[in-house]
Amino acid sequence: MILNSLLVLMGLGFTAATILAVASKILYVKEDPRIAQVEDVLPGVNCGGCGYAGCNGAANAVVEGKSGANVCVIGGIETAQAVGAVMGLEVLEMEPELAFRDCTGGERAEELFNYEGANNCRAQALLYDGAKTCPEGCLGLGTCVAVCPFDAIHMGPEGLPVVDPLACRACRKCVEACPRGVLSIVSMSAKLLHVEEVNDCLAPCQQKCPANINIPRYIEAANNGDYAGAVNIIRERNPLLLVCGRVCPRPCETVCRRTHVDEPVGINMIKRFVADWEMNNNLRLPIPCAKETGRRVAIIGGGPAGLSCANYLRRLGHSPTIIEAMPELGGQLRYGIPEYRLPKKDLAWEIQGILDLGVEVRTEQKLGTDFTINDLEEEGFEAFFMGIGAWASGTLRIDGEDAQGVLSGTEFLTAVGLGQTPSIGPKVIVVGGGNTAIDAARTSIRLGCDVTLLYRRTRDEMPANTEEIEGAADEGIKFVFLAAPTKVIIDDKGKATHLECIRMALGEPDESGRRRPVPVEGTEERYPVDTIISAIGQKPQLSCFYTDGEEQCNIDFTRWRTIDANPDTLQTSIPLVFAGGDAVSGPDLVISAVGAGRHAARSIHYLLTTGEIPMADNTMRDLIPYTLFKDVDGCKNKVRTEMPHNCTGEDRTTTFKEIEGCLNEEELRYETSRCLRCGLICYDRDVPLKNIFTNRVGEKVE
């Protein structure tokens, strides 16, 4: 019986072995030897950060083409190159990437209701979109912490995730886990290329800034004594911080939430402090640039738009060349803004920092005279940016305006900027109410002239910066409001002797929203004058697009005789030609030109590298309404710091010394402490509040 059983078992075993042997021949699948080779060069830690089941799973994914040579998130460039060698791929070094949190709310964000469910952000988001009042902010339950395989994230004391840059491997697991999108993986280039979206954490001041500088973030860095950090944050959006710290009219401050408590934060004062700190210490903080791409871009015009575009193209790895018609770079910054507002040595220092990145320059080369777009194409340039500014002056459209002694504001200021002494008489009348008119008037008084500024509306309607108008009045400039020129009276030698004007009355509002000036018949009056400076508007000089009367490139213009460019991409009717700054907008702010330069650089980068220019559907184009509330509770009054002055009296009106000074460190600390560190709707409070909110179920909670 036992023997029979053994024989049966042996028979069954032999039969099974035979079947398996035959099956192995029939069903045999040969494993790709590259899988083992790839697995051998991987670290072998089986961390799962790549998203696959250990290193063997990652190796299979690479061989099957489901992942690239950079599959391993902890191995770095050496591992990627080793994997590439196995697969026969060339691996180029990529910019470092890190997880980045775009939310500043945390504990400052009020709760809509009490949540007592699973301790998971994704679960809470399913219940009325989460308990936080901010519809975009962090829910604070730490789901990102739980999913990070490298312990690179922890919840900080403010109830927000904090990323450890040394531990983060940019595996994207935290990004995938966050239901609000407050975490992202970014590189230096990604930060430069990002266009602000409505779901970003954007304080009102950042929304209003034409360059979208992260103002709360750099103020916080300055408040912590991290001046270098503040400079670097500003430079992500503005390479001309020294300039803007002096001449920007601060549109950001008009929507500062602090205005609903007392006065806006001195945002520009803080920017100037950190910019001056870098220059005065001659630090030249390192500015990172991406790896060279070899793509050549011509920047036509070296003003703020062109300088900004060149800066960001270079930081993205391209090779820009600025071609400028004037002897030196700067555009209206150099030739239009007087020394007492913007010292030329400071401008030169800032421009040199941009050129040191590797930007080439050609000066005294004028488009349409010395070169054409076709010439540049033949030279090897692949894309073009037109930042030619608005150098042509508007005319008075009155009899005698061609007389000797009548100048345009740009002509006058450019001569002064070139170091020349304009031929003007002792009695000067400036016509206009904008910044160019004020600059011309204040420059004239420094040249020893008796100056009157003539404006057809009232002081309240003047478009010039309020501080500039007040400065002009302080310096003894006389104002004649509600008057418009009608005729220049000339002598027998063709020289202006008087300016005839007529009184005006304000009628109905015009397109600008200001009341239209209407002449009052029979009120003509003559003012004795030696020099008349007309500063009533500027526009782009479009003659550079024509050679011998013929258009040299088929570019479209608007009915206002500016370059027609797509408002999002700044691409013109010629696909490889982009334009920005005053050439597109007409006379505008320096910071607007800076923002346009970066946006154009972004578009050029994408067009050259991918063939298309992506724009998100939720791109922020206007202020976000729900962030503009006026009820700002729990904040104590703090008086705004006064801007110090470097000179007064005759020292101010007889020289071109810089007028405005810089805060000292004590004043800086105080002014930065006034910032509420606003997010979309959150902000810092000085005292704890106990507010009652209505939750989304309709119940009241404390």
Image (cartoon, rainbow, N blue to C red):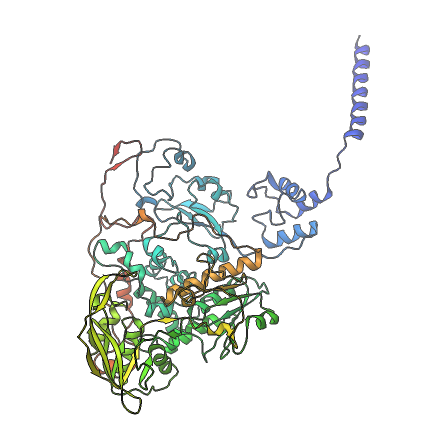
Residue for point 61% across, 57% down: 92
193 to 634, vertically: above or below: below
609 or 410, which is in the foreground?
410
Image location of residue 597, percent across then percent down = 45, 64
Between 516 and 576, the residue placed more toward the observer is 516
Foreground residue among 325 and 546:
546
Residue 265 sits in quarter: bottom left
Looking at the image, which residue is at 24% across and 64% down? 516
Indicate the position of residue 277 as horizontal and vertical percent values.
36, 69
Q: Is residue 598 above or below residue 422?
A: above
Relative depth, front residue between 678 and 54: 678
Quadrant of the rendered image containing residue 670: bottom left
Can you see residue 597?
A: yes
Q: Residue furthest front?
A: 521
Residue furthest to the bottom: 493
Q: Residue at x 31, y 64 (%)?
A: 268
Residue 499 is situated, as x and y percent measured from the top left of the image, at: 24, 81
Q: Is residue 183 above or below residue 482?
A: above
Q: Is 69 drawn above or below residue 387 in the view shown?
A: above
Q: Indicate the quadrant containing the N terminus: top left, top right, bottom left or bottom right.
A: top right
Q: Is residue 694 left or right of residue 334?
A: left
